[in-house]
Image (cartoon, rainbow, N blue to C red):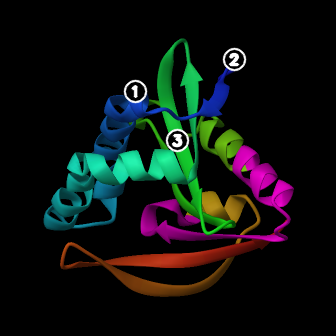
Amino acid sequence: MIKDIEIREATLDDIPEITSIFRNTIRAVNAKHYSEKQIRIWSSGADDIEVWEERINNLYFIVAEYKDMIVGFAHIKKGCHLDGLYVHKDFQRRTIGSKLLRIAESQIMAEGYEIINADSSISSVDFFDSHYFEQIRKHKTSYKGMEFKSSIFSKEL
């Protein structure tokens, strides 16, 4: 467990660190469950800077900082959908993801929603299970022409 984690809203200046976490986490953590081609295509999303700018400008987007370094991030779309939650590959399993999730859940409840939904990679199933989410269904998503196995999770708040 790491103490002194600060959670704040993301700014456009955070994009280089956010995209680095996105790319490196996929390459290090998700590589256990997906092919090299899938990892290459998925992690290339870090290069879509306009998408990251749009997310930061239009979604509830938070970052976790430890000693002035961003070590994780999460963003919510459509009011109650956890669209992304990533933790730096060197800070996995140290409560950062849990803290980001709690803040996201609080934001969702503050907006009047009673449920949180998440689309999860295979790699994150245990995380969502441990946070009392119910796996609604397994499915395949498509990104840049490549199919990925994933799951839809839901939890009452």
Q: Which residue is denoted by mark 1 in the rendering?
A: 13
Does residue 30 sit above or below 52 in this rendering?
below
Does residue 118 sit above or below 47 in this rendering?
below
**Type of residue at label 3?**
Phe
Q: Indicate which disc residue 73 carries.
A: 3
**2 left or right of 14 in image:** right
The C terminus - image quarter: bottom right
Residue span colored magenta: 102-125
- Quick one: label 3, few (<14), some, or many (20+) residues within 10 Å? many
Q: Residue at x 69, y 67 (%)?
A: 80
Q: Residue 89 location in percent, x, y?
A: 40, 37
**37 left or right of 107 in image:** left
Kindly report the distance in space between the C-alpha atoms of the residues bearing marks 2 and 3.
16 Å
Q: Look at the numbered disc 3 and give the secondary structure of its residue.
A: strand
Q: Which residue is denoted by mark 2 in the rendering?
A: 4
**Type of residue at label 1?**
Asp
